[in-house]
Image: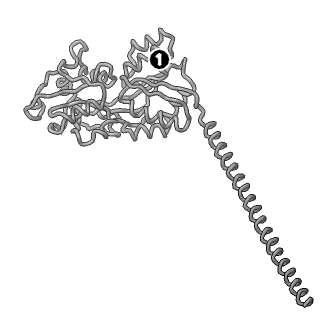
């Protein structure tokens, strides 16, 4: 009987030993997994830290590349140049940083602002007048003129008017109120509604000088009192496209957006054939109502960001933006 107990005791001891061995083995396995998991977490944290550091470095490098991050620039003037100037500003800021504010108001307001030193650059769809240049000199300004794009003043009519061409003289008589019915120029028997730009518009002044006052004395020629005087190219498009029997003029950069809501009229000067505005006819000035578009700055106060902006405007990239907006590049 004692032999049987001894045998049973031996088996119990062996069994307990095996169980302890399994427990020890299992415990070792769990510890190893925890160690591996901890190491993996530490590695992930290290990768995250590296990624974060790399991202911060990229941001810092990007900010360093934007040279004019803390500088400002104000442009004021021509509504003809307003939309393309906004596109120039946006593209410039994306690459170079800075804060550029683009204001409209018309060429006259832009030129007045630079003479009064309340803007950094003046957008203008006409050249500065002699009296304005004299005023600038008297105030100690050193005016720099940049020709930034070419433009054509496009004659547009409402869709019910199918007059294909008009001469400079006919246009002058229409906007002076001497021709008041479309039948006088080959159109229907209907009263002409003429839409022009307001007195602060460089486009309006250019049209006055180039068309209405062409080969005439200034005292005898001006817009008719019956002529609508509107603030922007967009206003003219809306008037002409939204009302019958209308005629107006817009910069070529607005012709694309006007689309087929208006009819385009070719223009003839003297005995020459009538010519329609296009990139080619505006660039070679064969279209009779072609002109330059300007930006004016004061060299005495031109900031580094203003100089860089003008270099961008005249660069291939800046000129491409102008052409995409419908104007004609100068380079």
Give whichever of 75, 301 is nearer the camera. 75
Q: How many marks?
A: 1
Identify the residue at image location x=85%, y=84%. 11
Secondary structure under tag 1 reads: loop
> For mark 1, what is the residue?
118
Q: Is residue 88 visible?
A: yes
Identify the residue at image location x=74%, y=65%. 33
Q: Is residue 144 visible?
A: no
Quarter of image, res 23: bottom right
Q: Is residue 246 left or right of residue 73?
A: left
Give whichever of 252, 246 is nearer the camera. 246
Give whichever of 81, 100 is nearer the camera. 100
Q: Is residue 131 left or right of residue 171?
A: right
Q: Residue furthest top?
A: 138
Q: Position of residue 18 (x, y in %)?
A: 83, 78
Position above or below: 37 against 226 = below
Q: Is residue 191 left or right of residue 201?
A: left
């Amino acid at each position: 009987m004692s032999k049987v107990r001894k045998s049973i005791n031996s088996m119990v001891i062996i069994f307990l030993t095996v169980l302890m061995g399994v427990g020890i083995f299992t415990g070792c396995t769990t510890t190893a997994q925890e160690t591996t998991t901890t190491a993996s977490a530490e590695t992930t944290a290290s990768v995250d830290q590296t990624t974060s550091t790399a991202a911060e470095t990229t941001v810092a490098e990007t900010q360093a590349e934007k040279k004019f991050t803390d500088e400002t620039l104000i442009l004021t003037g021509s509504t003809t140049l307003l939309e393309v100037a906004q596109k120039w500003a946006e593209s410039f800021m994306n690459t170079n940083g800075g804060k550029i504010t683009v204001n409209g108001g018309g060429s006259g307001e832009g030129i007045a602002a630079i003479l009064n030193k309340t803007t950094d650059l003046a957008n203008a769809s006409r050249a500065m007048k002699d009296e304005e240049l004299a005023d600038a000199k008297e105030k100690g300004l050193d005016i720099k003129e940049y020709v930034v794009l070419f433009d054509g003043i496009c004659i547009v009519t409402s869709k019910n008017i199918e007059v294909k061409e008009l001469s400079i003289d006919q246009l002058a008589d229409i906007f002076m109120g001497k021709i008041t019915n479309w039948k006088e120029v080959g159109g229907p028997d209907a009263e002409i509604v003429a839409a022009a730009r307001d007195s602060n518009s460089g486009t309006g002044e250019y049209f006055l000088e180039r068309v209405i006052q062409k080969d005439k004395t200034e005292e005898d020629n001006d817009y008719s009192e019956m002529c609508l005087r509107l603030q922007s190219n967009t206003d003219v498009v809306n008037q002409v496209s939204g009302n019958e029997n209308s005629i107006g003029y817009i910069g070529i950069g607005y012709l694309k957006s006007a689309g087929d809501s208006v009819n385009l009229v070719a223009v003839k000067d003297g005995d020459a054939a009538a010519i329609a505005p296009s990139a080619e006819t505006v660039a070679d000035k064969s279209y009779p109502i072609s002109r330059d578009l300007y930006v004016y700055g004061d060299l005495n106060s031109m900031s580094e960001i203003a100089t860089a902006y003008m270099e961008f405007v005249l660069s291939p990239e800046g000129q491409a933006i102008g052409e995409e907006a419908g104007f004609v590049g100068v380079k």
